[in-house]
Image (cartoon, grey):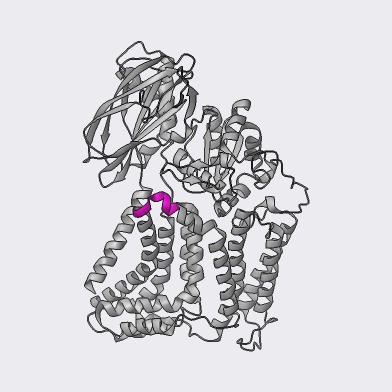
Amino acid sequence: MKKLFKHLVLALAIVVAFASQAFAAKPIYGKVVDVMGGAPVNWTLYATDNGNNTYTLVFSGAIKAGYHGYSLSDPFSAPYFEFKGGKKVGAMSEPLKGKMHSHTDEYGDVVKHYKGTMMFVQNMQAAPDTKVTGSIGANICTDATNQCQQCTFDFEITLSPVKEEAAAAPAAEEKKEEVKAEVEAEVVAPAVEEANTEAKAEEHLVASAAPTAKKLDWSSIISAIIWGFAALLTPCVFPMVPMTVSFFIKGSGSKAQGRFRATMYGIFIVALYVLPIAALILITRFTGGEGVTEDIFNWLSTHWIPNLIFFAIFMIFAASFFGAFEITLPSSLVNKSDAGAEKGGLIGIFFMAMTLVLVSFSCTGPIVGTVIIESMNGGLWMPIITMAAFATAFALPFTLLAWFPSLLKNMPKSGGWLNSVKVVLGFVEIALGLKFLMTADQTYHWGLLDREVYLAIWIVVFTLLGFYLLGKLRFAHDDKMEHLPVKRLVLSIVVFSFVVYMIPGMFGAPLNALSGYLPPMTSQDFRIDGSNDNLNADVKYGDKLHLPHNLKGYFDLDEAIEAAKKANKPIFLDITGHACNNCREMETRVWSDSRVKDMLMNDFIICALYVDDRTDLNTEDYYTNKNGIVMTTLGRKNNAIAVERFGVNAQPGYILMSPEEEILMPVRGYDASIEGFIEFLEGGKAKM
């Protein structure tokens, strides 16, 4: 058992280490010196601290208008990089390779090249405070005559763990002046003109905006914690309370030993919930890379098969809670676990925890599924973090009861009230289960659950719940109610108030409080203001995809870039998804503000990239990702573009860029501050 305990602790430590690494990446800035002076390309160097003395070096080259550079794979004009200090890990990669242009040279050969920006990435291993120096050599050629010059640069960067968050995003003006001073002081050729120095400063500032640290999705974490505590009141879990107390009262030994055993009980409960999902992520990531893991979770959260399975599970559990039948795990499995709990020491505690998890899973299973699905839009590690939050909240009451068995005296005994809780949960299961059917409906454009149909079902479900709380609706296993308790009356008032709140939504009211749980407003067939026309029907994929608030835009990045060039406007790129609750909330709460809507409508070219849409692409629109995998659906193509070009793997992600595809502001994620969003848009306009 000691070995099992060590393995569990080691596994949890690995998960925590990887999760902290994923959310701790911060940029470190180096110095680049142009030894020629006034070269047609300016380089920016930064590194990301990945932890464990590993770093990712990013070389971003800003190419002047009228010039182009080449890929590492070019047989004649490939750039070269020399390093002194540190140890290179793997080969250098090119994250912008999918954006390369092409031209026909004087020999009639089609040659691919970079315009505007080229970027090269090298992973390195180095002890703290290691200074890495070296040089860059790049062939930069004119577009008109293809005359080339070899541009050579020296660089240096000190690789040390970044501790201050402020290093990732210094004040814009201070950073600009700092870089400008560095360039003026260190460029060897003193004749570099002021305009070139300003351009280098601006490029450094823009590049510093790119590596934004991944943020935790706190709404998913808080939701998971609430579900964890609420699970205690489910009819499968609550009866385990006296069993827990009885087990730990029988234990012998000192008070300190008893509390150690109680703490281990809580740790085992958390581990039994967290480790399976963590194992799935780690195994798929190490065997197939991060892209494979993302594909698996993207498939789980958006494909019709798992969504319909989850929908069916919720409906089956709802029927069970209403008393149609009883759902239990195989008795042999529970009996074996229960028998193991009779053993002493840590092995007995482990099997006691396993018994709790197995017996309660018939009630917590749907909750666990909801927690996992809801967290998938927050990045690769969010399912682990949210599951840990749920499991910790779920385990905490049992751990406290194991610490202080006398607390049981103050808890209500199980009985008829649990039957009422079970029926209430049945109604809630029906309402929540519709979310999975809605996700499949939106991603595959079936047209089954328009917004008013969804609302109509919710209104009926919660109306029936209100009548049940008043005692006007009874089930076979309910006790006869002679008088209406005050608690039921208060709950029925809350439920009927919620129903009244939803009714205006049938006619187009935004219902901001529910924006993350309803189909988008664009699926509403009828609105009093008549604002349900699709203004984007004439653009690519516009027959299936829509923008909120009657905004006009695009759903294909190349098409949006062409439109931005013609209009000479910056692009507002919205990385979004049909299954993204936070995306709908941002659109309802923030985009609806008259100032935001006016700026989006008049000052930007809007492009919404749905990363979970299942529309099949035409052959000419297929996209090959960096691993050579061909993406044949719109969602997978957009997801690969978001991750490879912009480093965004969570929704929503908002990017402002010029028609030349230069990033104008740091990538913005979920943040419901209207004033902050306006500052974000105004900052992009100013950079443009």
Q: Is residue 123 visible?
A: no
Nearer the observer, 272 or 545: 545
Q: Is residue 353 magenta?
A: no
Which residue: 35% across, 67% down?
Answer: 271
- Magenta highlight on residue 288: yes
Q: Which residues are magenta?
A: 287-294
**Image point (61%, 70%), residue name:** 430
Left or right of 377 in this view: 397: left
- Image coordinates of residue 25 in percent, x first then y, are 36, 44
Q: Residue at x 34, y 20 (%)?
A: 183
Q: Residue at x 51, y 80 (%)?
A: 235
Examine the image and state in which quarter residue 275 appears.
bottom left
**Predominant secondary structure in magenta?**
helix
Q: Nearer the viewer, residue 166 or 563?
A: 563
Q: Position of residue 379 (x, y in %)?
A: 45, 51
Displayed quadrant of residue 278 = bottom left
Residue 387 seen = yes
